[in-house]
Amino acid sequence: VQLLESGGGNVQPGGSLRISCAATGFSFSTYAMAWVRQAPGKGLQWVSSISGSDGTTYYADSVRGRFTISRDNSKNTVSLQMNSLTVEDTAVYFCAKDLSGGATVSTCDYWGQGTQVTVSS
Amino acid sequence: SFELAQPPSVSVSPGLTATITCSGEKLANKFSSWYQQKPGQSPLLLIYQDSKRPSGVPDRFSGSNSGDALTLTISETQALDEADYFCQAWDSRAGMVFGGGTKLTVL
């Protein structure tokens, strides 16, 4: 299993950014996927999840209405479109795979290396 | 809202047992997980469904759920166990919830 994030970078407050994760080594459409972020020197915070087959989405309150998670099972990718970014969104964003193939991500058994998103003027 | 609380730091001498606790409400009906994160690395799943270990995780690591608290126990602690440890549970309203993390120091 490999998860490779891309698309991170620097963006001004109020701006937008799209990050993606390419997955290999498992039956991608079977598993829910998640984005988890970690602000500098802080703990882990779940951001969003998407189910494997029907694309049901879930969001943390802090990002609902601003972020949109999506997946392309034909390309084995999951993406996070981030709009109206604030300095509080500055973090390393990890892509993670669900352990058990349930409707949402309840436990992450594989994580990518992360992609840095910095929101600053 | 559902929250998990961990002590910020725990210290242990090499060869002894380290215990990291994680408190929260209504844990009896929630499965928990524990992750290890070393500086500059991604989190690593150590324990899932309260007490199960993924393949490759040493049996020195064990977990439990008393209903009132989650516990990660590391026996025969080694210097390489020095890391941040995060508990996590899933809540139907809050989604994936992580504890704030505990820095384990082996000295």
Image (spheres, rainbow, N blue to C red):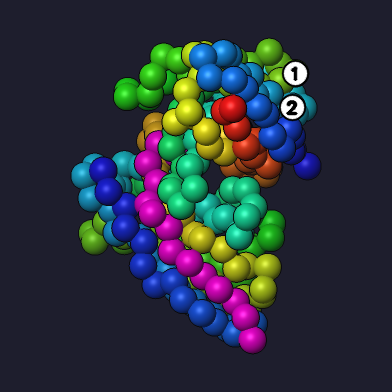
Q: x and y percent of residue A32 in the render?
A: 41, 45
Q: Is residue B94 above or below residue B55?
A: below
- Which residue is located at x 51 percent, y 79 percent? A10
Kindly tell me whether residue A95 is visible in this rendering.
Answer: yes
Q: x and y percent of residue B92 in the render?
A: 64, 38
Which residue type carries mark 2?
A: Ser
- Which residue is located at x 36 percent, y 61 percent? A5
Residue at the far front: name it.
Answer: B107
- Asked if the stretch drawn in magenta spans residue A96, the answer is no
Magenta range is A103-121
Q: Quick one: label 1, few (<14), some, or many (20+) residues within 10 Å?
A: few
Which residue type carries mark 1?
A: Asp
Q: Quadrant of residue B28?
A: top right
Whether tag 1 and tag 2 are in contact, CB under 8 A, the answer is yes
> Which residue corresponds to mark 1?
B68
Labels 1 and 2 share a subunit: yes
> Which residue corresponds to mark 2?
B23
Q: Earlier in the sequence, mark 1 or mark 2?
A: 2
